[in-house]
Image: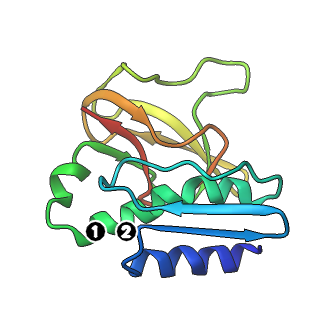
């Protein structure tokens, strides 16, 4: 499945009243699940061995973000989520052999760096715009993220 088709499916899923979509093509399975809470991601049905694997891992989070935009209680929830400032590849540590910038249970302050987004060979720091304790990290290191995609949920 090519990237354009995958993006079209995610967009369609975001506008449809579906809770779950599972597609199998060429021995690969893609599962997109809309959770009851906008910040709880679902994991893919099976790991994919193609370049779409990073997109497939991020698609449930993206669809969750699209559902939160239609729900009236989105602003309080959004205040407790750190989102990606732009599209790119997310790195949760400064280098492959270094420890991550933050971990679950750490306390974040406003302006604290939580990762790096690489786009076109340029690394942009990702800084928290909210303070709180990290309850969950919603994406994996090295995954592709979209602008405004939830990265971390805070309590």
The image shows residue 151 at horizontal and vertical percentages of 44, 45
38 sits left or right of 114 in the view: left
The image shows residue 104 at horizontal and vertical percentages of 42, 23
Q: Which residue is mark 2?
A: 66
Query: What residue appears at the point 56 percent right and 23 percent down from the top-left corner?
Result: 100
Q: Are marks 2 and 1 in contact (CB under 8 Å)?
A: yes
Q: Which residue is mark 1?
A: 69
Location of the C terminus (image quadrant): top left
Question: Can the viewer see residue 86?
Answer: no
Does 52 sit above or below residue 111? below
The image shows residue 68 at horizontal and vertical percentages of 29, 63
- In which quadrant of the rendered view does residue 99 lie? top right
Question: Can the viewer see residue 96?
Answer: yes
Does 144 sit above or below residue 126? below
- In which quadrant of the rendered view does residue 59 lie? bottom right
Query: What residue appears at the point 22 percent right and 47 percent down from the top-left corner?
Result: 79
């Amino acid at each position: 499945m090519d990237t354009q088709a995958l993006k079209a499916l995610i967009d369609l899923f975001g506008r449809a009243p579906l809770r779950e979509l599972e597609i199998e093509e060429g021995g690969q399975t893609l599962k997109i699940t809309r959770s009851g809470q906008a910040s709880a991601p679902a994991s893919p049905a099976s790991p994919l061995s193609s370049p779409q694997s990073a997109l497939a891992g991020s698609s449930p989070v993206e669809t969750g973000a699209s559902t939160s935009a239609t729900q009236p209680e989105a602003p309080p929830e959004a205040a407790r989520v750190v989102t990606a400032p732009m599209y790119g590849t997310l790195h949760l540590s400064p280098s492959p052999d270094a420890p991550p910038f933050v971990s679950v249970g750490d306390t974040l302050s406003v302006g604290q760096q939580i990762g790096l987004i690489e786009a076109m060979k340029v690394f942009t720091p990702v800084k928290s715009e909210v303070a709180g304790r990290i309850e969950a990290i919603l994406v994996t290191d090295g995954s592709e993220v979209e602008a405004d995609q939830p990265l971390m949920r805070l309590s």
